[in-house]
Amino acid sequence: MVVGKGSKILVTTRHSRVALIMGINSPFLLQGLNDTLAWDLFSKIAFTEEPKKVHPKFVEMGKEIVNMCKGVPLVIKTLGTILGLKPEESHWLSIKNNGNLLSLGAGSDNVLSVLRLSYNDLPIYLKPCFTYCALFPKDYEIKKNMLVQLWMAQGYIQTSDVGNQYFKELLSRSLLEVAKKDVDDNISSCKMHDLIHDLAQSIVGSEVLVLNDNVKKEKTLDKVYHVSFSHEQYIHWKDLKIKDIRTILKIDQNFDPNLIWSTPISNFKRSRVLSLNGINGSNAMKILKSIGKLSHLRYLDLSCNSLMVLPNAITRLYNLQTLKLNGCRLLEEFPKDTRELINLRHLENDRCESLTYMPIGELTLLESLPLFVIGTGSKVSRLSELKRLNNLRGELSIKKLENVRDGKVESGEANLGEKQYIESLELEWSYGEEAQSGEDAESVMVGLRPHRNLKELFIIGYGGRGFPSWMMNGELSCILPNLITINLDSCSGCQILPPFVELPHLKSLTLWSLEKVEYMDYCSSGGPFFPSLEYLELKCMPKLKELWRRDLSPTHPPSFPRLLDLQIQNCNKLASLELHSSPLLSKLEIFACDKLTSLRLPPSPLLSQLDIQYCGDLASLELHSSPRLSKLEIRDCRKLTSLRLPPSPILSQLDILDCGDLASLELHSSPRLSNLKISSCPKLTSVQVSSLPCLKALDLLRVREEVLQQLLATAFSLESLFILDIDDLMTLPDELHHVSTLQTLEIWGCTHLATLPHWIGDLTSPNHLCINSCHQLPSLPEEFRSLRTLKSLTIGNWSGLTTLPDWIGSLSSLEDLEICECPKLTSLPEEMRSLTTLHRLNISKCPHLSERCQRENGEDWPKIAHVPYIITDWDEV
């Protein structure tokens, strides 16, 4: 770990002795919640109604219980949950009179005793599900689906639906915590609080063993049923009763070519869970030859292996419920007897694109199948394998659809219309494949009509000239009314889009590489225009002229009532963009739309980010008041001649780059603008600003000197100034003299800068100064010697610099000195010895100086030997 001088390390602990070991005499002790906050937390969890509507005796008991919790949030939350589930007075009294609660102190043992009440309160069916979570290390992010599969493998539950219900119940009791949610706001992973993990571990005792780098051999116990680990070499198998182990779980998913499984797999005869993920292919094949002997196995993880073929021995695992093959990118075939795995519910094969043979048609209990690949040749997977798999749920991706032989017939045999639990469907034709004509692709699409419950539809590489009838003719909103997300990518033959505008619940629409689409047609029925759409992305649509056809639009142009984010990229024929009413729009990005000449935005009260780049013909930009606008970037809009920003009360970052014709800039009331960057605007002469009281960082690159002057006149709080290639700058403007807050000043490539003003030594706050490629400057100005606060000095590309001044020793706070490309600089002054705070010295591309500063042998080495970290062209010390 490399840190800079002055960095801090924050150590947190529940034990005071740790602070003593660290040498901390006065640790910061976190206090519990005060009485008010503690009662608010408890009452929100324990009472379904406001406390004033609750019977007074429960309020009185609740306050007594809260007082005994000593302000510990986890205890308050846990007890509140228990009491909320059991409103009987007797139960409240038993908690109030609990001896462990009465004696609660700061120690974790007391807290655990109280937390154990939450375990005792669990229904019998939840107890093993909870304690099994001790198998994961502290702070580990547990994927919900994996946890449910593991519970099922141990026999704690019979179905995934029951497992999902148990998971929610543990969350509601605060025994699990939400870690992540997916895009649909469903919980995808959880964690356990450290103390809750301690509770689970105290209950299971030696039955669960979590191995890591710190586990010593003598700590490995002989009465263990469940083991988790990161690397197999940490396990001393001979110290464990292998025949009793029911879980062997590798908790990381990384491929490790050096990972060797040394113990015969046939020894784990009672195992129900086995992870062999990340083992190299040859070793895995050797192990798997005898895996058929594990008759009790219900969960097998072979993810991230380099297997090409699964051995037939796997098909003898008749009780197997979960088989994970994620990331087995070389895997080509399943065994021909895969149909024997009649109890298989989860076949996870994400990122196994090399598959060609998947005989899974008899696995009617299958619920998870992320990927199905259609092969070529005699021994291949056909869509008919999916016909009877109507329990599939979640996500299904069907790839290599160009290999379908008899389009309409075979695609119909997939029976997608009967798969009511599938929420996300991806249909993909491989890029660059010509095995199928456009007519054949259309026939395939006809038979792939999904169930009306579908929420997400992705179509990639489709070569048909039009979309199937079930997507067109106004029927889409009836056939797939629940669609939330649509992504069309590389559907190069289609010119007319389906009526997406009518979908009542569509939130996200992404259109990529649709080469022939010119418009998004307005719905002929005159209904609402994208009533729920929040995200719209249009990318690489070279013929798109407008968002909708004006000749088909009603009198009042369509609006986007719920649109939050609009991104348009590489739409070369888009000439104008007019958003009429988008009251919720918060982010707008337009990139590489070469023919866009005008952009008109309506008042957007929630617009926070506007980004316009590489729109070479944009000459008119009309912006209305945007009270929430915080970030604005305009880049490479070469024909834009003027820019007027309306009052923007919270605008904090403004970047204007490569606008060659921009002559005037007006900023009306941007009181919170903190970062301003203007680059490559050579014609900019007029900058009108009222005041920039919060401007902290100003970067000016390839602009005129007068722009610098005009901006400095209103920037009284400036902390950082970066100047690059201002050709007419001969000295720093006097407006900078009054900026007492300046901390960083960098001047690069100002070839006519001949002097620095005498007042530069009067600056009181600078800690970083850089001068680079300013060849007219004869030497470092003597006024620099007064910069007592300077911590960092960089001198670069200074061909005329022959010596460093003796007064450099006066920079008493200097910590970092960098000298680069100063070929005539031949030595360092003796005063370098006075720089006692100097921590880092970097000398590069200074051949004479680098030679003199060689470690031990250089003539100038004694002057710098006290510097801890030295880098030169010769060596690094």
Image: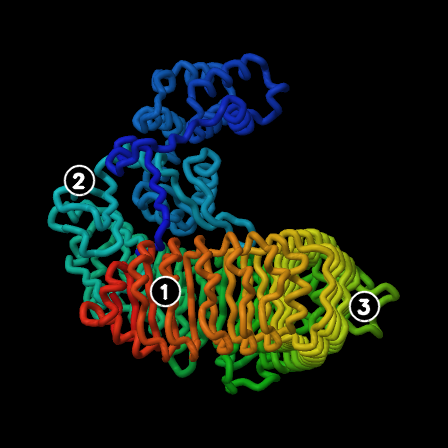
Q: Residues at badges 3 and 1 in contact (C-beta under 8 Å)?
A: no
**Mark 1 against mark 2, which lies toward the viewer?**
1
- Name the amino acid type tagged 1: Asp
**According to the image, label 1 marks what residue?**
806
Where residue 213 sits in the image (x, y, percent)? 22, 50
Q: Secondary structure at mark 1?
A: helix
* Nearer the observer, 501 or 621: 621
Where residue 773 sits in the image (x, y, percent)? 48, 76
- Name the amino acid type tagged 2: Lys
* Label 2, label 3: how far apart the Cα atoms are: 72 Å
Count of numbered tags: 3
**According to the image, label 3 marks what residue?**
524
Examine the image and state in which quarter residue 818 appears. bottom left
- Name the amino acid type tagged 3: Ser
Image quadrant containing the N terminus = bottom left
**Left or right: 322 in relation to 451:** left
- Up the image or down, 48 lies above or below 293; here it is above
Where residue 251 sits in the image (x, y, percent)? 31, 53
* Nearer the observer, 63 or 627: 627
Which class describes the residues within 10 Å of circle 3: few (<14), some (14-19), or many (20+)?
few
Which class describes the residues within 10 Å of circle 1: few (<14), some (14-19), or many (20+)?
some
